[in-house]
Structures are given as structure tokens and as C-alpha cells.
Amino acid sequence: MKIELRTRTHKSGNRTLYLEYYEKGGDRRTESLNLFLIPETSDDDRKVNEATLNRALKIKSERILGIESEPERERLEVISSKCFSDWLDEYEVYVQDARKMTPSYCSMVHTTIKLVKSYLSHIRRPRMQMVKIDKAFCKGFLTNMKDEYKNTKSPGNPKPLSAKTLKLNQTIFIAILNHAVKEGVLEKNPFYELHPRDKFQKTCPSSREYLTVEELKALADVPTGSPNTKQTFLFCCFTGLRHSDMVALRWRDIQQTDAGEIIRLSSMKKTKQPVTVPLGAQSKALLPDRNGASPDEKVFPNAPTISTADRALKIMAKRAGIEKTITFHCSRHTFATLTLTAGGDIYTTSKLLGHTSVLTTEIYADVVMEKKTEAIQKLNDIFGNLPAE
């Protein structure tokens, strides 16, 4: 008998793995392995496929030998008895200790795990076994997160999760399941069996809120009981710093060069990449008085937390007549769009933002082009069709 490992490609791009048996006399039969390879769009995808292919080859070898090894039986017993909730706890420790990810990413992983555990309680299966994690579970989790879960940061006014937050939680959920496959505690990632319509798609770039010059001036002039929020938000609008980097900013990071004063960070909190940002007149005016502070002291020691700032900014925006949902991170979007609108090239803007890829910055270029198109359309509406000479 001859045994071959075969693949069958589906419309989704996934490739099912199966064994084909050739008997003497020309008879053939197949055996489904319940394993499949996914489209490789990242290093994690390639690692998952490599682990899946190795498992398929191992099964093929066992079929050729005509035995089922004791280690394989033990591994399957571990899979069948492993609790998903326990695996979630193990994954969180792995992200914090083994991968040594940034605090912000670890916080996002913690939030996603909390959402999954909330869904497990919702379906009354808090100790659900790994072997039960299937396509239906994945679909149910996404539906629950979108239609039933409410953000409780504002207890008096709980709101549904935003499209961006839903996509982020989905991405982390996929990573959790992929790691389970890699570690051999899950046979396959059932998320990839979902139809595209059941998944959260990437949000439209133009949905990123930012302030125009007029809106920024209006916000700067509005009275507020949260002066620290206004000061730090405007400072980030003119420097492009994230909230995390602004909070950690030290006086030693502000340096004098031949070209003028700059902010030089050796490692941003999120990406661990260095960034250098020149300080213009507006950003200098927003710096607090140093008052003899040492180089190691924080520039903004009284900076608000992100949640406190977001609440205050919503109030300020309403008072300023701005009909947009403004968060602190909008300062970074504002810096990017204003820089490009003022004539900055995309490569320079990318460096100022500390992006690791210019492709990320192109999102803002698309937004600026939309505004330019709107401006041209307004001219057309004003002048109409001028008579030709």
C-alpha cells in the first residue's frame, strides 16, 4: 500500500490536508485529517502552518507503520481535558514573561481574555474544554462581543464596543488560538472556518477622527475645568506623541541642537523604535515651566490618565461645537493630517510619527486627499461650468 499526503484548496484560501491510500489493483480511498493550512500573511501564520504540516506528516508516518504512538494518545488526552479558561491564563503569562511585550499590549491581551471569559460565563460554560472550541464558539463569541457586550468604563452610560476595538479583540483572539495550535493543545484554529461576513473587517481609514485647524483653535479657546488635559492634548497635536510617550517624557528628552530644540526618544513605549520630533513655536508654548526640575523629572507630572482625558475631551469638544467623537489619540491623527496638509511629504511624516512602515502613514494621506477632493468639488459648485473663450 502507498500513502500520500494531499491538499484540497477551498474558496476561502484554506487548504485541507488529507491522506490518500493506493491499494494494489488500483483501488483508492482517502482519510480526512481535520487539519488545514491557512493563507500565510504573517510569521505567525507560517509557524502555524509549519506545525500543522509536521503533525500531518507525523500521522502519515504512523499510518505507514500501522501504529498509533503512545505519546500521541497522551497528547490527545491532554487536549480533551484541557480547560480553555486555564489556557487563557497561561497565554497571558506567556505574553508577559516569554514574549516580554509592552505594558499596553499586555493590557489589550488582558482585556480580550476578560471578554472571552465573560462569554464563557454567558453561555454557562466557564470550564469549557479546549476540544469544544469550534467554529460555532468563535462565531458566538464575536456576535456576543458586538451585540451584547457593553463597555463599562462609564458605568452610568455603557456603550457598545467600537468597530476598531472589535477588530483589535478579534486579532488577539486569533493569536491566542494560533498559539494553542502551535503548542499542540488545539488541533486547528476553528476561526479560519468562519465565513468572511462573520468576521470583523478592517475599519475604513477615513473613519479616523482628527481636528481641522479651525476645530483645533476652537478647542484651544474653550473654557475647561481640566486644564492639564487641554495642555497635554494640544501638545500632542503639535508633536504627534502618543499619550504613553507624553506621560513618560523627561526633561532630558528635550534637547538643544543647531537646528533648534527637539524631542529625542530612544524608544517609544508601543513600538520600541526611536523617534525625533522638532519643537515648533506652538509646542514650546505648551510646555510647562521647568522651575529648576532635574533632567530625570517628568515634563508633565500631572498628566491625566487616558480615560480621564477622554471624558474631559468629549465635554470640551461639545462646548467648542465640534461634532466628532474626540479621544486623546485623535491628537496623533490631527498631527499627521495637519503635517501632510501643510505640505509635508509622507516619508518625513512617517518618521515624525515613528511609524515602522510608510504604509501605515498612507492612511492619513488618503484622508488628506479626501479633503483636497472636497475642496475642488466646492470650487466646482461655486463656479459651475465657465464659458469657454
Image: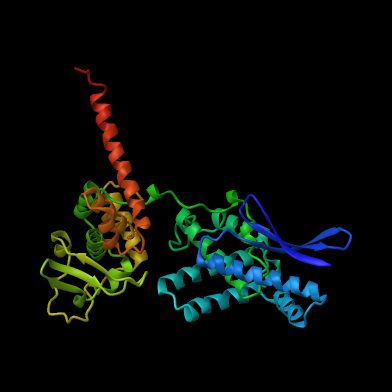
Q: Is residue 192 above or below residue 204?
A: below
Residue 373 lies, in percent from the top left, at 30, 38
Residue 46 lies, in percent from the top left, at 55, 66
- Nearer to us in this view, 188 or 248: 188
Residue 337 lies, in percent from the top left, at 28, 51
Q: Residue at x 22, y 18 (%)?
A: 388
Residue closest to the far left: 258
Q: Is residue 257 above or below residue 370?
A: below
- Nearer to us in this view, 248 or 19: 19
Q: State the colouring used for the structure image.
A: rainbow
- Nearer to us in this view, 53 or 273: 53
Q: Residue at x 44, y 63 (%)?
A: 153
Please state the total of marks drawn on the protein image.
0
- Nearer to us in this view, 192 or 18: 18
Residue closest to the far right: 25
Q: Is residue 188 left or right of residue 262?
A: right
Q: Quadrant of residue 2?
A: bottom right
Residue 261 lies, in percent from the top left, at 14, 68
Q: Is residue 182 left or right of residue 367?
A: right
Quadrant of the drawing holding the C terminus: top left
Q: Is residue 259 left or right of residue 209?
A: left
Residue 264 visible in the current orientation: yes
Q: Is residue 80 left or right of residue 317?
A: right
Residue 129 visible in the current orientation: no
Residue closest to the far front: 25
Q: Is residue 281 above or below residue 84?
A: above
Quadrant of the drawing holding the N terminus: bottom right
